[in-house]
Amino acid sequence: MAIQDELLAKAREKFPADDDYDKIVAAYEFADKNHAGQKRLSGEAYIIHPISVALILLDWDMDRDTIVAGLLHDVVEDTNTSLLEVEEKFGHDVAVLVDGVTKVGQARAGRDDIDTYLPRTKDNLTKLLVATGADVRVIIIKLADRLHNLRTLEYQPRNKQLKKARESLEIFGPLADRLNMGRVRVEIEDLSFKYLMPHKYAELKKTIDTRISRSKQSLEDVRREVSGALTREGISFRVDGRIKSVYSLYKKLNKHPNIDEIYDLIALRIITDDVTSCYLVLGVLHQMYQPLPGRIKDYISRPKRNGYQSLHTTVETPKGQIVEFQIRTQHMHEYAEHGLAAAFHYNEQKIGGGSYSSKGLAPMPKELKWIQDLQCAAGKLRAGEKVDLDDLKVSLFSDRIFVYTPKGDILDLPAGAMPLDFAYQVHSDVAAHATGFTINGKIARFDTPLKSGDVVEVITRRNVIPHVDWLNKIATAHARDKLRSQLKKAGRLKE
Ligand code: MN
């Protein structure tokens, strides 16, 4: 089916009312006319891109105006069309969305030097999100836009690939994570990682595939056994498999280099009707199999910061197989996969009909309250009031930083991490012999807090051994554990 037909068919399916459908068709025709003659680097007609973005947004069950704005998202930036024309034809709401996406794009273009680009990007993006109206649908359109650009990144020259991939990994991945759009995050991260470190990607992908095919049969046995037990208990459920993404395996291996100790390459997901059933399932599992200590996590009573909810446990079967389970309700499942987009969907269903603007946002989990803060600040800015961005505490990225080795490998560290944290993440032996560090080519103190985009080099000397004083120059538990055991071994630290 030609992609245009796919768009029209999907639009009709999701928007049976003529009013809605006609507006989407009008947007498609308008974009098609204005992008006429333009081509992408792949040689395809340009219109394929906005159509693809609209298809992604349709998949995420977004509202009509978001689909319309998705189709129009590049007309103001890349054609002679004015925003006013968009507003006249498609209304104020759509114009605000198109304007937001355009501004986010413009302010980020034209700065090609990646080294100076990254450290400033976070702040700029935060400010932009606020200043451009901060209708959270702008972010969602931007994510769909970026996703399609990543899917077609092969046609770009290598330097552009690297720039887009880095930016995606450092900004759009965390952004999707903060919106709890798990599926999007995984795709963005894996695509970016593939372009940044192609060999590592291929190697880890192969590792995952091999291990999956090796454990397929035994996992199927466990699945059958568990299904039987849950059915006997009268619990209604379904079981899904979840395969770890390549990039998350990469990150995990940075912390725990032994792949045999990574138990969640494949996890079984049990999806039930309600919260009580989730705890019942956990109970049944723990009666059948021995749970591993320290691996039971109750994200239902204590959701993650982005609103993610599930029970996690890792068990050992009598045959010695180690399996991770994730237990959640259908609602939690949809929210974990589609995040904010799912929140929109639920809102539509609950209230039914009408356009987004008449309803406002769905009641959001408190973990997503930052979005409301953002919108509130945006409203003030539009009204000409002053907003102190620091007061906003928009902590989009404040909890993670991305740091590079001189070879260009990426390490993902918590904010506040210092050079020794970096070194211990690279390798404990390297860290143990550290005599100094350079950050971006300049000698740096041991207690310098690292920033996203920093390139860190560890200077080592054979005769150096770890010092107790280092314990004060470390921010991560991983580094602390490694250092303590090295100190004990060297007789420099008592129990
Ligand atoms: Mn675009």
Image (cartoon, helix red, strand yellow):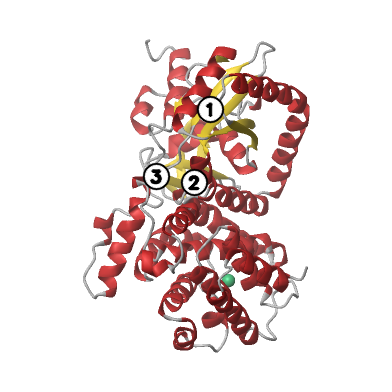
Q: Amino acid at mark 1?
A: Ser
Residue neighbourhood size for the residue with mark 3, other residues' Cα within 10 Å, grouped as few (<14), some (14–19), many (≥20): few
**Residue located 41% across and 51% down the image:** 397
Label 3 with label 2: CB-CB less than 8 Å: no
User: Residues under labels 3 and 2: Cα distance?
Assistant: 22 Å
Residue 364 seen in render:
yes
Label 2 with label 1: CB-CB less than 8 Å: no
Please provide percent x and percent y for residue 39: 70, 79
Viewer-side residue, 66 vs 216: 66
Q: Secondary structure at mark 1?
A: helix
Q: Amino acid at mark 3?
A: Asp
The residue singled out by tag 3 in the image is: 399
Q: Amino acid at mark 2?
A: Tyr
**Residue located 46% across and 45% down the image:** 438
Q: Nearer the viewer, mark 2 or mark 1?
A: 2
* Of pointers 3 and 1, the one earlier in the residue sequence: 3
Viewer-side residue, 428 vs 119: 119
User: Is 283 rendered above or below residue 450?
Assistant: above
Q: Secondary structure at mark 2?
A: helix
* Of pointers 3 and 2, the one earlier in the residue sequence: 2
Quick check: 49 left or right of 438? right
**Residue located 44% across and 76% down the image:** 99
The residue singled out by tag 1 in the image is: 428
Please provide percent x and percent y for residue 17: 55, 71
- The single residue placed furthest to the left in the displayed view is 385
Viewer-side residue, 44 vs 250: 44
